[in-house]
Amino acid sequence: MAQLASIRDDIRYGFAVGRVRALQAKLLTRSVFERLIDAPDFAEQRRILSETAFGRYLEQASTATDVERALDASLGDLYDEFLLEAGLPEAVVRFFRLPYDYRNLRTALKTRVLGLPAPRLSTLGTIEPAAFLGTGEQLPGSMCALLTAWDDAEQPPALSELETAVDHALYEALAAEARRSRVAFLRDLMTLRIDLANIRVLLRANAKRLPGPEVAKAMIGGGSRSIEGLASEVSRMDAEELAEAVAGTRAVPGLDVADLLDLERYDLAAASLDAARMASARMVPSGPEPVLAYVLAREAEVVALRIVVVGRLSGLERDVVRERLRGVL
């Protein structure tokens, strides 16, 4: 049965794999990002990118907002022209678009509950941005319930509580789509990302000396049980004991104790492990892995361009930009 499934995947993804092999050569290299960082101004950055697939999107850009919109447009075309035209399963397409729905939900919640100003909503999700405004009745039941969860509260929630609620909902939705896709790579990727998110919860909780029940509430379901099980123990450990306990679970190969003793170092290590998982998928000769790895690489490319181009436009020093770029590529 496994062999038949593999054959079906090779056929289903065959056209997309053929396109990916040609498109991979057009991904931006590290040397291009170095040139962008060293460029004296945005005009030179735009000239460098004119030689790439992003050139046509940035032709009229002159401000950081213009760049953000241009990069969003490039992602929109990636989803419309690649994911859909390649005939990928609906669950796979939704896996890539759902994060933008939850980004909009997060923004709408902050506006509704905390009274923060509303920035532009993304058009890259599966739901029209207008649905997040007003009563939320046009949203799916779970999203509407979350949007209105604090409407009758006497006190607004802390920002961290709001962020945790949206993060949980997003991870649950992505894990569900990964299961629906029947693509082992997506399921494994979600397990890794949930584990990495939960480890970060443990590290922050340990630093704040939060009680076990509060830590358990902040943990995301669907990851490795050995990581989730540490929630009840975290308040009784010092930082080194927790680092050793996390590393000792071996749930995330490649993490060592030193990575777990400093949150900034951990974030870089987590990003590197995520990138390594995608890189390994690109080496698979056929099936869904190289296709999905290409889309993930394009998304990471856009994140990196935001860091470099918008960062420099905002006046960040070159060394700061380089530091923020670590782990993304």
Image: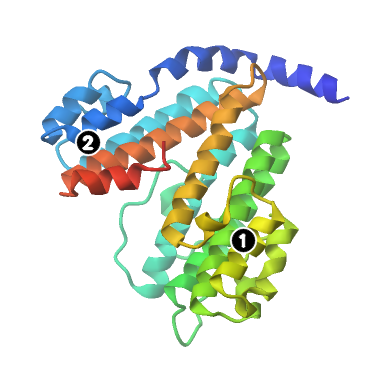
Compared to residue 282, the image places residue 62 above or below, namely below
Crowding near the residue tagged with mark 1, few <14, some 14–19, many ≥20 C-alpha atoms within 10 Å: few
Q: CA distance from mark 1 to mark 2?
A: 42 Å
The quarter of the image holding the N terminus is top right
Label drawn at residue 142 = 1
Q: Residue furthest right?
A: 1
Residue 232 is situated, as x and y percent measured from the top left of the image, at 69, 75
Q: What residue sits 52% from the left and 17% below the top?
A: 20
Residue 206 is situated, as x and y percent measured from the top left of the image, at 54, 73
Q: What residue sits 67% from the left and 21% below the top?
A: 287
- Regarding mark 1 in the picture, which secondary structure is present there? helix
Observer-side mark, 1 or 2, equals: 2
Label drawn at residue 37 = 2
Residue 270 located left or right of residue 315: right
Question: 322 or 58, which lies in front?
Answer: 322
Question: 329 or 237, which lies in front?
Answer: 237
